[in-house]
Amino acid sequence: MPQSAENGHTSDQDHGIYNANNVKAAIKTILVTGGAGFIGGWFIRHMLKTYRNAYEIICLDNLEYCSSLKNFSAIEHLPNFHFIKGDICDRQHVESVLNDYHVDAIIHLAAESRVDHSFNDPLAFTAINILGTHCLLETCRKYGSIQRFVYVSTDEVYGPNDTTLFPFMEEHPLKPTNPYAATKAAAEMIIHSYRKSFQMPIIVTRCNNVFGPYQYPEKLIPKFIILQEKGSKMPIQGDGRNARAFIFAPDVAEALDTIFHKGSDDETYNISSSTHLQVMQVAEKIYRHFASQNTTDQLSSWVEHLEDRPYNDSMYWADGSKLEALG
Ligand SMILES: NC(=O)c1ccc[n+]([C@@H]2O[C@H](COP(=O)([O-])OP(=O)(O)OC[C@H]3O[C@@H](n4cnc5c(N)ncnc54)[C@H](O)[C@@H]3O)[C@@H](O)[C@H]2O)c1
Ligand SMILES: *[C@@H]1O[C@H](CO)[C@@H](O)[C@H](O)[C@H]1NC(C)=O
Ligand SMILES: *[C@@H]1O[C@H](CO)[C@@H](O)[C@H](O)[C@H]1NC(C)=O
Ligand SMILES: *[C@@H]1O[C@H](CO)[C@@H](O)[C@H](O)[C@H]1NC(C)=O
Ligand SMILES: *[C@@H]1O[C@H](CO)[C@@H](O)[C@H](O)[C@H]1NC(C)=O
Ligand SMILES: *[C@@H]1O[C@H](CO)[C@@H](O)[C@H](O)[C@H]1NC(C)=O
């Protein structure tokens, strides 16, 4: 274990990733793609708060509808924070960013992330999640000075555990069932080839469903809260018995920090929560929070059932013990 594992990494001297041989690597500049998104914002704020001016943090984001710079109000004036509007598919631009800022490490979060939408417009997901990731990798390969690359993938690459064999094997097969998850898995395959063919140091993380403040309100929890606040019904696809493991965004930021500093190249880490809730249970919790004293009022009158998804994935399972062992 590197020393920082025991001491926490709060001092400015005692930071930097450790490679497989526990040799400290000098990382100074971190590029965060999709940094203006939900998880990216939490990660950037976490890093700047925890390590103050130890790192230069570059946020590269093309500001899709779901992004927001508003949540950077507390950090945007910091001299070591830089926002750049740009597309990961624009290789020339990304190359100039890598060179101009002498980028050492990348946390790659930029993606089309709305599962629902992937059923209607799957090719948009291929363009950003697969081709975009490939463009970024290729730009990094030519640049040649990336010492750490963390790709943020999803538990959905495993496929719901009703379609796979039990018990899970250590190298769990990837069997995504929706187009979003398939593009995230495909990008993992390209990453695997870049590790092997070009010795690029890449870590993959697979994360459960994230929730927390600043999430774009199209996602389940903020959507239901806003609807209940307005006194409107919560729409539920199918019977609502499908479950997800939910993890709090600040915890994900901390997990990414731990993996960034202590993880090993070529490894995959699940970022998981033991809190599984069915969609209907989420609705019930939110309903209870807003419930009036009206005793004849029932949860059932506050939900409306919609047509199910083309594939109703009942639940995902990710074993997080490897990350726990990392600290
Ligand atoms: N939210 C979750 O529950 C969850 C769970 C597991 C994994 N993930 C993964 O984490 C990452 C971030 O998710 P999020 O919830 O913060 O999503 P988000 O949609 O809030 O953020 C994605 C960001 O990427 C940016 N972006 C999109 N296309 C881009 C492009 N071509 N170039 C540059 N920037 C681009 C968007 O503007 C946005 O700011 C994604 O890769 C997602 O697959 C999310
Ligand atoms: C964060 O961003 C969201 C989405 O744009 C916005 O609704 C919210 O007011 C912002 N909050 C802060 C504290 O900046
Ligand atoms: C998914 O796997 C976990 C762990 O093995 C198990 O407890 C759970 O019941 C499974 N869920 C389904 C729907 O098969
Ligand atoms: C998924 O769909 C099947 C078949 O339509 C249905 O029997 C089942 O209840 C659904 N499961 C969930 C969790 O919605
Ligand atoms: C109580 O709730 C029921 C069911 O939602 C509704 O029909 C009724 O109008 C409510 N009564 C009052 C006094 O709000
Ligand atoms: C991630 O979780 C899956 C499902 O439980 C498990 O099979 C796999 O071994 C875990 N992978 C890692 C790298 O921990």
Image (cartoon, rainbow, N blue to C red):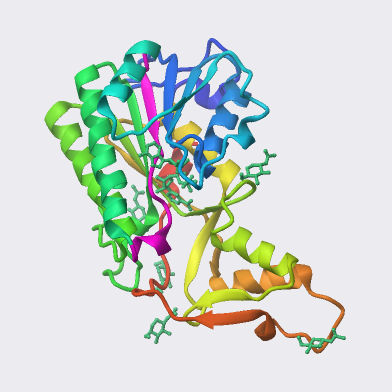
- Picture quarter containing residue 219? bottom right
**Closest to the observer, 278 or 81:** 81
* Residue 172 drawn at (x, y percent): 27, 56
Outermost residue on the right side: it is 293
Report whether 194 appears left or right of 120: left
Q: Is residue 249 above or below residue 317?
A: above
Identity of the residue drawn at 41% across and 54% down: 319
Q: Residue at x 34, y 74 (%)?
A: 311
Asked whether residue 110 is drawn in magenta, I would say yes
* Residue 317 in sight in this render: no
Asked whether 166 falls inside the magenta stretch, the response is no
| Residue at 62%, 46% in the rendered image | 214
Quadrant holding the N terminus: top left
Of 67 and 108, the residue lying toward us? 67
65 w.r.t. 56: above or below: below
Q: Magenta span covers which residues?
A: 102-120
Q: Quadrant of residue 189?
A: top left
In x, y percent, where is residue 96? 32, 17
